[in-house]
Structures are given as structure tokens and as C-alpha cells.
Image (spheres, rainbow, N blue to C red):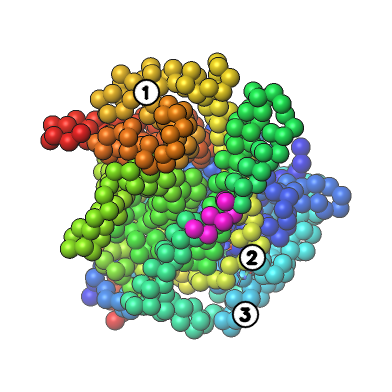
């Protein structure tokens, strides 16, 4: 089952399967560790539900909803 | 020219801490020619030769996106005309996040210069049970590896040995131009694959989660505790810049007054005496008066940045700031501008996106700074009756004061939106921000930051501020030896009177507008001088004199003018210094003046139409 990063609830994990983002943004994210096959966890939303905090490769990255909705995942629960 | 070594690495990997350990206070901060990126260089002495070490801006990739990353890349590849190709590169990595850090290390290795990999944060890695086979890592990467604890100085000796080894070699970098903006996706994948392999081969024991990090994170982001902490930080920063700096500023002011009095005793010539006391000493005093605020604000900024909280505050505020086209990181500079725009504008350097940074700088002076308060207090005391409003909850003077704060803020919101949708429109760069681990800030790093910022302010902006103070002194004291009524300033006041008449201002207020360019609150002393002399010494207080000399409507119009006008040479000087061009201060001054003029005009003429005087 695939979903996108912004659809996870806090604490849920997924494995990246692809991107629907401008190439430049995609590559920036990839260089930070958002690679196909890597596991990511939605740690939390900011109080107004945007941006969100994501755990990837032993680091925490904040991205906005707009970008998160372009990261496709396989759900890990 | 000295041999150059570069320190490179991811943001927050501990580069600056290691740089400080290597160089101590022998540092020089300047701008790279032609750009606003700061060049931080220091001198290290090994075996009797002096080496220049450059602390490069943090970067995640050798493919640059921001001006800072571009500089880092140019220096590493030896492509900058002002800096020789490095003799070696010290690549600092955070050992608690090796995979991503190795991605950059692999790119840097490809440049082909002598390189040392510094496994920093070794203490944290150990604490979380991680273990690395350094020998294996070194073989895999093909470069020497040392483990280090930057904040304790562990590993610094080995870094010095590396510098000594390559202090006399000359190898040329392999890259002949700055790498393209973005690598192909396949390139990123394959390099990460390599990083993963290297890690798998050299890691003996992977890191476990840090319960301490989890615990702190849980507290910091807790709905109640976290909000309380955020509020506390906001209040403490605001209060400290506002009030804690006060005793120091007062002390400075008193010292300079004393100094002035001391000088007066020895100098008979009135003109020379006035030049020294009212011009020079007062000018230097007004420069140094900012230092306590800058000192305190950067103390907090440094603590917040190094502890990892700053990024969290930006995370919390991003949505709100996005509404006006800015971003999370604009929040703190704007908050501190309520005390004073000078440190606020300097704090904008934490915003990486250039257009967001400029837009924040352009609205920072609209926040009601403390220098406006003496003006507001005087005029409110003179004209606003002490009555309770809103069911006797607040007094009318408080309401007026709050209204003035709101006016500045409201206009700032509009200006930010307009700027961000026109001249400063950035192509929608995604807001991607690392939230670094929580760490205990290092006293040395914090002190270095404060020291560098204060020194830079005094040296760069200070000279401009002093120059303008002296110029204004000349305007107020010539040609008739210190008589302000027949001075150039008065002539200028009369000259601009037709232009400011429609705002309800006469030539005497005109003088005040001109002299207060040195600092807003100067208008109070200028008006007091002018009115006193005019009224003859009638024994009235300044408030009473002002009440006699001005109409209430003029006072309101004047307050609106002060809320919006850029009556502050120091602000312009510091914007010049931070943007490295006169274009932005010129723009700032023009738009704020036009805005102030129009709003005052509207206030005064509108008020008259409604029958006020
Ligand atoms: N635990 C630990 N913290 C460190 C070490 N080196 C630096 N730090 C801290 O890590 C944070 C970031 O360091 P800094 O030098 O500003 O990183 P930079 O962004 O790469 O220049 C600061 O709070 C430092 O005090 C280290 O070896 N161990």
C-alpha cells in the first residue's frame, strides 16, 4: 500500500518508493538522505500542522507539507 | 602568502568548535569580496610556520545551492581568486550521523587534495554505544582518520600534525569549475550506496537511540511544557535586550558624560570643546551604547543556535511567518528588533535564504525599538489625558502606546508581503531545515561569537555611525559657533518647512527631525534646547513647554512619523555592512520615509477635516 509522507500520523514509519517533486527539490532531499528504499518516520507536526518533523538517517529534518506530499512511501505502520 | 587549509563539513558537525580550538582568538572575520558571505579565517602556528585556516560555511553537498555553499565549494576547489588552493582539507564529520556526513566526505575526497577525516562528537557516539574501526574506515576512504571531541580539544593535536605534514606541499585540485547546481539522481544514489558500504565495513557497533535526546525532545515539544519554554525564551530574550542591557548602557553613558566634563575643564576654546564633547565623545558613546545590546542578544542567539533550540523555534514559528511571505527563522531577528533594530538586523544572518533575509532586514526597523519610547513618552505625557478606557481596564496613554506598536507591526506585515511578492520574490525554495541534536553549548564557541560580532560592529558600522554623528554636529553648530538657531540645521529646518508643513510640523520640529537622524531620542533634547531658548527660561518642564508649543494633532502626526520613518543612521550603517552595498540602505531609507510622510499627511490632514487641531 502506498501513501505520501504527509498522510502518516505522528510516530508512523514508511519506506520511500518515489517522488512527485520538482527535480531540484527531489535532489536536495535525496542528498539529505531521502532516498528510495530508506526508512523515514514522521516524528510530529508543528502546532499548525505545517511544517513536519521527519526522522531520516539518524537526523531530524523539517520540511513543509507541500514537499512531504510529494514523497511517496510504502507504509510500515 | 601563507599556506591555506580549509575546514569543511555538514552544518552542526562541530567545525567552528574545532576551528576555535585550533586558532584561539587569532581570527579575522571579513566578507568574501563581492558577496555578503562571511569569511572566517584564523592563523595556526606549526613548526614555526604560519598557516591560514578557513572555517567554511557548512554544507551538505559540494553541489552548491546557496551563496554560502558556492563559496565553500569554490574555496575547496581552489577557484577563488582571493584565496590560493588549499594545501589540505580538514573534513569534520558528526560521528552520530556518519552515513550522511560520509556522503559529503566522498565528494570532498574526489577533489583530490590531501584530506583528513575528523570523526567529531566521538563522546556522543561512545555514549550511545557506537564503535567505529578507524583503521578500516581510513582504508576504505583512502584518507587518514582521527577521532575527536571538539569541545574538549581532543584530537586537535592530530589535526595540527596533519597541517604540519602538508604545510609544504602543493597539489592542485582536480575540479576545474564549480560543480553544477544538482547532481543526477543516479549520482546521489551511487554515492550513498558507497557511503553505506563504507559504514557497513567499518562500523563495529551501530548507535542506539539516545534516551536523553528523546527525553529532552519530549519535554521541548510537549504541548504545555514546550509552549511554556518557548514563551519563556521569547520573554527572556526580549527582556534581556530591553532591560538587562540598560545598566551597562547607563554606565557607558555616564562614563562618557564624565569624560566629556573632564575634557571641558581642560579645553578653553568653546568650539574645540564642543567638537570633542558634543561631537567626538558623544559620537563614540553612541556607537558603544549599542554594544551591550549586541553582546546580550548574540549571547542568546549563540546559546539557542548551539543548543539546537533555534531550529526548533523556527520550526514552531514557520507557519505564522509563512503567512507574510517570510519563514520561521525571521522570528527571532524581528523579536529582538523591538529592543533595537541594530542587533536584530545583525541576527538576520541566521537566515540562509537571501531574499527572506533581505525582506526581514527591510521590515526590522518598523518594529517599535526602544529609542522611539522617549519620543512617544514625551508626546503622550503632554497630550494624552490619563483616563481609563475599555471599562477602566487600561489607561488611554497605554492604549495609544499599544496602538503605535500595532501600527509598526501592521505596516511591517504589509511591507513584507509586498516585498516578497515583488522585488524579493524568490522562486519557491522549499523550507528544508535540519533540526540538530540537542547539545550543551560550548562556552568558548559562544564567547567567540559574541566577541566577533561586537568587534565587527564597532569596526564596520561604528565608523559610519561616528562619521554621521560628527557631520550632524557640524550641521548643528556651524556657522555661528554652537548657536543652533542660526545653524545649518536650522537653515535646513526652515528649508524643509514647506515640505513638512502639511504634516503639521514647523521648522523647529524640522530641526528635530534632522538631528534625530543620529538617534531617534535626540529629538527630545533638540526640542528641549530649541524651545527653552525660545521661551526664555520660563521654568516650565519640557512636557509643559511641548504642550504650549505643539497642537495635539501635530503630536499625533509626529508620533506616526516616528513610528514609520527610518530616523536612524545606525540602522542604515548596519544594513550597509550586512548587505555589503548601499543599495539596500538607500531603499530602506526611501521607502520608510515615503511611508512615514504619507501616513503623517493622512493623519494630520484627515484629523483637520474631522475638526481636530
Ligand atoms: N558532545 C559534543 N558536542 C560538540 C562537539 N563538538 C562540538 N560540539 C557542540 O556541537 C554544537 C555545534 O558545533 P559548531 O562548532 O557550532 O558546529 P558547526 O555548525 O559545524 O560550526 C555546539 O553546541 C558545540 O558545542 C563534540 O565533540 N562533542
Q: Is residue B507 magenta?
A: no
Bounds of the magenta span? Answer: B243-250
Residue B141, given in percent of the width and then of the height, sits at 63, 63
Q: Give the foreground label among 3 and 2.
A: 2
Disc sitting over residue B457 in the figure: none
Of mark 2 and mark 1, the one earlier in the sequence is: 2
Mark 2 = which residue?
A: B443
- Residue at coordinates 23% horizontally, 64% vertically from top-left? B393
Residue in the foreground of this view, choosing between B326 and B379? B379
Among all residues in the image, which is located at the extreme right?
Answer: B48
What separation in Å lies between label 2 and label 1 (alpha carbons)? 53 Å
Q: Residue furthest left?
A: B610
Residue B243 location, x and y as percent? 49, 58
Chain letter for the residue marked with disc 2 in the picture: B
According to the picture, the residue beneath numbered tag 3 turns out to be B126
Q: Secondary structure at mark 1?
A: helix
Amino acid at each position: 500500500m502506498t501513501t505520501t509522507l504527509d498522510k502518516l500520523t505522528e510516530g508512523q514509519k514508511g519506506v520511500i518508493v518515489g517522488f512527485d517533486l520538482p527535480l531540484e527539490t527531489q535532489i536536495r532531499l535525496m542528498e539529505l538522505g531521502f532516498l528510495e528504499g530508506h526508512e523515514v518516520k514522521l516524528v510530529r507536526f508543528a502546532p499548525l500542522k505545517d511544517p513536519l518533523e521527519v526522522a531520516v538517517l539518524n537526523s531530524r529534518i523539517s520540511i513543509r507539507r507541500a514537499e512531504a506530499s510529494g514523497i511517496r512511501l510504502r507504509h510500515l505502520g | 602568502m601563507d599556506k591555506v587549509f580549509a575546514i569543511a563539513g555538514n552544518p552542526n558537525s562541530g567545525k567552528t568548535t574545532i576551528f576555535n580550538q585550533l586558532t584561539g582568538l587569532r581570527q579575522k572575520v571579513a566578507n568574501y569580496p563581492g558577496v555578503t558571505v562571511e569569511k572566517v579565517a584564523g592563523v595556526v602556528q606549526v613548526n614555526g610556520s604560519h598557516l591560514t585556516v578557513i572555517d567554511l560555511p557548512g554544507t551538505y553537498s559540494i553541489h552548491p545551492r546557496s551563496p554560502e555553499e558556492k563559496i565553500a565549494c569554490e574555496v575547496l576547489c581552489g577557484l577563488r581568486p582571493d584565496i590560493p588552493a588549499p594545501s589540505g582539507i580538514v573534513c569534520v564529520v558528526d560521528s552520530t550521523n556518519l552515513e550522511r556526513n560520509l556522503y559529503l566526505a566522498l565528494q570532498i575526497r574526489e577533489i583530490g587534495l590531501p584530506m583528513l577525516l575528523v570523526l567529531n562528537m566521538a563522546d556522543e557516539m561512545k555514549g550511545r554505544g557506537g564503535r567505529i574501526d578507524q583503521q578500516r574506515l581510513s582504508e576504505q576512504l583512502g584518507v587518514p582518520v582521527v577521532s575527536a571531541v571538539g569541545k574538549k580539544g581532543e584530537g586537535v593535536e592530530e589535526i595540527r600534525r596533519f597541517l604540519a605534514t602538508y604545510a609544504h606541499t602543493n597539489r592542485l585540485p582536480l575540479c576545474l569549475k564549480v560543480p553544477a547546481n544538482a547532481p543526477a539522481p543516479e549520482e546521489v544514489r551511487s554515492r550513498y550506496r558507497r557511503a553505506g558500504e563504507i559504514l557497513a565495513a567499518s562500523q563495529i557497533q551501530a548507535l542506539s537511540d539516545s534516551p536523553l535526546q528523546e527525553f529532552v525532545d519530549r519535554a521541548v515539544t510537549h504541548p504545555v511544557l514546550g509552549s511554556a519554554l518557548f514563551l519563556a525564551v521569547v520573554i527572556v530574550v526580549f527582556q534581556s535586550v530591553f532591560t538587562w542591557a540598560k545598566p551597562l548602557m547607563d554606565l557607558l553613558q555616564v562614563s562618557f558624560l564624565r569624560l566629556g566634563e573632564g575634557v571641558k575643564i581642560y579645553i578653553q576654546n568653546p568650539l574645540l570643546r564642543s567638537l570633542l564633547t558634543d561631537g567626538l565623545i558623544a559620537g563614540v558613546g553612541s556607537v558603544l551604547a549599542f554594544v551591550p545590546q549586541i553582546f546580550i542578544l548574540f549571547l542568546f542567539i549563540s546559546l539557542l543556535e548551539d543548543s539546537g533550540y533555534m531550529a526548533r523555534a523556527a520550526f514552531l514559528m514557520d507557519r505564522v511567518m509563512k503567512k507574510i511571505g517570510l519563514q520561521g527563522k525571521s522570528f527571532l531577528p524581528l523579536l529582538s528588533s523591538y529592543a533595537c533594530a541594530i542587533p536584530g538586523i545583525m541576527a538576520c544572518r541566521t537566515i540562509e535564504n537571501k531574499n527572506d533575509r533581505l525582506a526581514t532586514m527591510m521590515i526590522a526597523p518598523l518594529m517599535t525599538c526602544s529609542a522611539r519610547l522617549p519620543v512617544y513618552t514625551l508626546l503622550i505625557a503632554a497630550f494624552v489625558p490619563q483616563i481609563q478606557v475599555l471599562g477602566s481596564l487600561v489607561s488611554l496613554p497605554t492604549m495609544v502606546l499599544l496602538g503605535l506598536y500595532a501600527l509598526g507591526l501592521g505596516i511591517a506585515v504589509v511591507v513584507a508581503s509586498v516585498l516578497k511578492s515583488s522585488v524579493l520574490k524568490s522562486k519557491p525554495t522549499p523550507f528544508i531545515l535540519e533540526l540538530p541534536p540537542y547539545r550543551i553549548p560550548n562556552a568558548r564557541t559562544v564567547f567567540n561569537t559574541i566577541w566577533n560580532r561586537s568587534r565587527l560592529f564597532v569596526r564596520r558600522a561604528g565608523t559610519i555611525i561616528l562619521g554621521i554623528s560628527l557631520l550632524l554636529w557640524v550641521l548643528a553648530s556651524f556657522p555661528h559657533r554652537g548657536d543652533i538657531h542660526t545653524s545649518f540645521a536650522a537653515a535646513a529646518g526652515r528649508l524643509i518647512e514647506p515640505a513638512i508643513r502639511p504634516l503639521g510640523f514647523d521648522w523647529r520640529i524640522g530641526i528635530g527631525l534632522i538631528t534625530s537622524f543620529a538617534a531617534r531620542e535626540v529629538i527630545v533634547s533638540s526640542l528641549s534646547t530649541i524651545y527653552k531658548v525660545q521661551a526664555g527660561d520660563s521654568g516650565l518642564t519640557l512636557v509643559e513647554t511641548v504642550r504650549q508649543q505643539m497642537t495635539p494633532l501635530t503630536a499625533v502626526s509626529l508620533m506616526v512619523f516616528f513610528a514609520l520613518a527610518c530616523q536612524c543612521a545606525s540602522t542604515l550603517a548596519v544594513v550597509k555592512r550586512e548587505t555589503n552595498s548601499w543599495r539596500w540602505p538607500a531603499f530602506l531609507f526611501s521607502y520608510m520615509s515615503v511611508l512615514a510622510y504619507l501616513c503623517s499627511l493622512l493623519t494630520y490632514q484627515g484629523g483637520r477635516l474631522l475638526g481636530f487641531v
